[in-house]
Amino acid sequence: MQPTEVRVQDPATKTYLGSPSLVRLDNGCLLATHDYFGPGCPRNHENEEHLTSVYRSDDEGRTWRNITHIANAYWSTLFTLRHAVYLIGTTQQYGSVVVRRSVDQGNTWTHPKDPATGLLFPGGPFRDPPNYHCAPVPVLIHNGRLYRAFEDFVPTTQNIDWWPPDFLSCVISCPVDADLLRRDSWTMSNKLRFDPGWVPKDWGKLDAPGWLEGNVVAGHRGSLHNILRFHSAPRWDMAVMTRLSDDGRILSCDLAKAFIEFPGGMTKFTIRYDDRTRLYFTLSNGSLVRGRATNRSVLSLYCSADLLTWRHVEVLLRHDSGYSPEEAFRGIGFQYADWQFDDEDIICLVRTACDGAHNFHDSNRITFHRISGFRHRAISDTANAQSARRD
């Protein structure tokens, strides 16, 4: 899987590249976005990270050009609907929920200045609640409705960086045929805080258990779920599955079904459903050795028939053999992959830390990748697993 560099940032700037998102436009071009974080990155009047850059490729991702920048756009997802492309996320690190629209392939974008132009759910000033948080998580269209997950950061202590116990999960939704820029088109669910008392007692004490960066997905029988990244250290590879009502108003947690073994559940992941194979897929940083800490220096493809049991299909990206596992754990990261099905392939954008990055987290590259023939390998793997169970 040979990468193409969309953006490279000199680590000396102390500016790092985050939140990649990717979509194919109706005209066949590819559109990509990312934002900036770190002590040297652009900041707004509240001293918050807030800038997103937009790139386009007209040669299937072989080359990219930066076409514009968007201020007050952060942690955002690209998606297309009715011959337009949208960008939905927050205005800044812990900001308001906003959506923008472009009808010229990403060259220009609407500005969310009020309830009629994309300012959906206002946040408080600086860190006064509500403090909306998210990542480039999927936008689900299901049964005529559009859904997207967020969190509200409501600190219970004076430590504003105490996460994720202070993240309240929520989902916003609207009719798919509504005007997406109007606040009155949208509904927000209740805000659900993770209760540490939900953790099974035989797990022992976890370090600050909580959730973030949810994926709204539809089960095979039409039920809606928000599957969230779960901070479960020192336990690894777990996620939390919540239930969402069809109208998007009620988010709940059934403890009997809440905790699932999920590869890379401690880091951001994206789940999408493939109609052709009737399988769910994710790209994530699962632990290749059971019981070991999640390692962002390895990115793999996984699949599931039921959202509950996940199977490793193949390693996509991993550290160079010249590095020891310990060096790679500290210094290399292939993370926050955003991806799409693209005919017979998967295309993906990866937040990458390598070749001079300060550490695995402080990514100095956004890279584009194409995964060919993924369905054949996933189906073969699933068939072999089913045969083994019969034997």
Image (cartoon, rainbow, N blue to C red):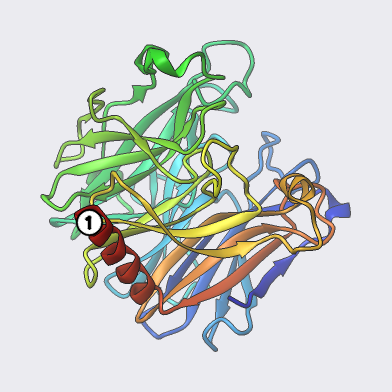
Q: Is 330 or 349 nearer to us in this picture?
A: 330
Any part of residue 179 in sight: no
Quadrant hosting residue 186: top left
Q: Nearer the viewer, residue 385 or 365?
A: 385
- Position in image of residue 5 (x %, y %): 68, 73
Residue 284 percent across, percent down from the top left: 50, 53
Q: Which corner quadrant of the image does residue 101 belong to?
A: bottom left
Q: Residue at point 60% right, 84% down?
A: 62
| Quadrant position of the N terminus in the picture | bottom right
On screen, residue 152 above or below 30:
above
- What kind of residue is marked 1? Asp
Q: Is residue 385 above or below residue 207?
A: below
Extreme residue toward the right, this view: 12
Q: As drawn, is 361 to the left or to the right of 88? A: right
Q: Percent from the top left, x then y, of residue 133?
A: 49, 37
Residue at which label 1 appears:
391
Instruction: Residue 143: name its quadrant.
Output: bottom left
Above or below, comparing residue 37 to residue 105 in the picture: above
Q: Is residue 118 left or right of residue 82?
A: right
For this orientation, the residue located farthest to the bottom is: 59
| Quadrant (top left/top right/bottom left/bottom right) for the C terminus | bottom left
Considering only vertical position in the picture, is 243 above or below 200?
Answer: below
State the residue in front, 315 or 247. 315
In the image, residue 177 lies at what x, y percent? 18, 60
Residue drawn at point x = 24 percent, y = 30 percent: 257
Q: Nearer the viewer, residue 287 or 75?
A: 287
Q: Residues within 10 Å of mark 1 (few under 14, many from 20)?
A: few
Q: Secondary structure at mark 1?
A: loop
Kindly tell me whether residue 77 is visible in this rendering.
yes
